[in-house]
């Protein structure tokens, strides 16, 4: 439903000073962690972001930058996360955490890295080092190093995804030589 200029100009919310509106937006939109886990659909934005263009413009940044969004990543499948980032154009300045159930699924990891290369989303950051690393930690390490390599390549002028993909395939070969389960 379209909102007319008369309706917007008579909005009590929009008649408040910007500082007061921002306090209201924060009270309504900022939560203690937002878990996004439904695999088949992107959750709708909060209703406040759907009221009118001006309110959306004013509070979208608060919603995306002042919340922490948590994603479950299983089998290196970041499809939901990538779709969410594309839907909200949310690759930068958004706080995301990943609950990664790593696997040795190279094709899924490569799809994620392609989205990282094109600046559509971010990837996992390396966990802190510890002496007792298990198999799951080593899978996460591979994914984190893929992310670091992909990020570096995306910043080099003139490097295309095809070039980056070939380099990542070389990385894949080295990883698979060390652990045939990655083959």
Image (cartoon, rainbow, N blue to C red):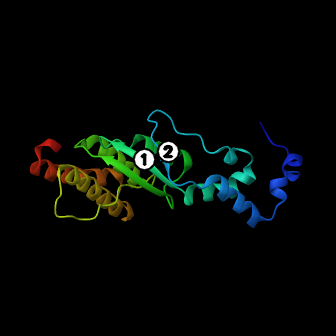
**Image quadrant where residue 144 sits:** bottom left
Residue for point 69% across, 55% down = 57
Instruction: Please give the residue where the numbered disc 1 appears in the rendered image.
Output: 71
Residue 95 at x, y percent in the picture: 48, 59
- Total marks placed: 2
In this rendering, position of residue 116 left or right of residue 31:
left
Which is in the foreground here, disc 2 or disc 1?
A: 1
Residue 178 at x, y percent in the picture: 10, 51
Residue 183 visible: no
Residue for point 73% across, 45% down = 51
Provide the secondary structure element on which disc 2 rests. Answer: helix
Say if mark 2 contacts mark 1, CB within 8 Å.
yes
Residue 21 at x, y percent in the picture: 75, 60
Of residues 120 and 68, the one drawn nearer to the viewer in this rendering = 68
In this rendering, position of residue 3 left or right of residue 89:
right
Circle 2 packing at 10 Å, graded few (<14), some (14-19), many (20+), is some
Residue for point 56% across, 60% down = 66
Residue for point 69% across, 44% down = 50
| Disc number for residue 110 | none
Residue 28 visible: yes
Of residues 21 and 119, the one drawn nearer to the viewer in this rendering = 21
Instruction: Please give the residue where the numbered disc 2 appears in the rendered image.
Output: 84
Provide the secondary structure element on which disc 1 rests. Answer: strand
Q: Earlier in the sequence, mark 2 or mark 1?
A: 1
Residue 172 at x, y percent in the picture: 19, 49
């Amino acid at each position: 439903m379209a909102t007319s200029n008369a309706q917007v100009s008579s909005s009590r919310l929009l008649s408040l000073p910007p500082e007061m509106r921002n306090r209201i937006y924060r009270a309504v939109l900022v939560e203690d962690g937002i878990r996004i886990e439904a695999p088949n659909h992107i959750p709708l934005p909060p209703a406040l972001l759907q009221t009118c263009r001006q309110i959306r413009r004013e509070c979208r940044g608060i919603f995306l930058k002042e919340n922490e969004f948590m994603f479950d990543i299983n089998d290196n499948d970041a499809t939901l996360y990538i779709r969410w980032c594309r839907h909200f154009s949310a690759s930068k300045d958004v706080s995301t955490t990943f609950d990664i159930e790593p696997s040795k699924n190279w094709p899924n990891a490569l799809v994620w890295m392609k989205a990282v290369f094109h600046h559509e989303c971010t990837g996992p950051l390396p966990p802190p080092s510890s002496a007792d690393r298990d198999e799951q930690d080593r899978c996460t390490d591979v994914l984190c190093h893929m992310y670091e390599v992909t990020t570096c390549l995306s910043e080099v002028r003139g490097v295309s995804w095809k070039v980056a993909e070939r380099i990542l395939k070389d990385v894949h070969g080295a990883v698979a030589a060390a652990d045939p389960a990655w083959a």
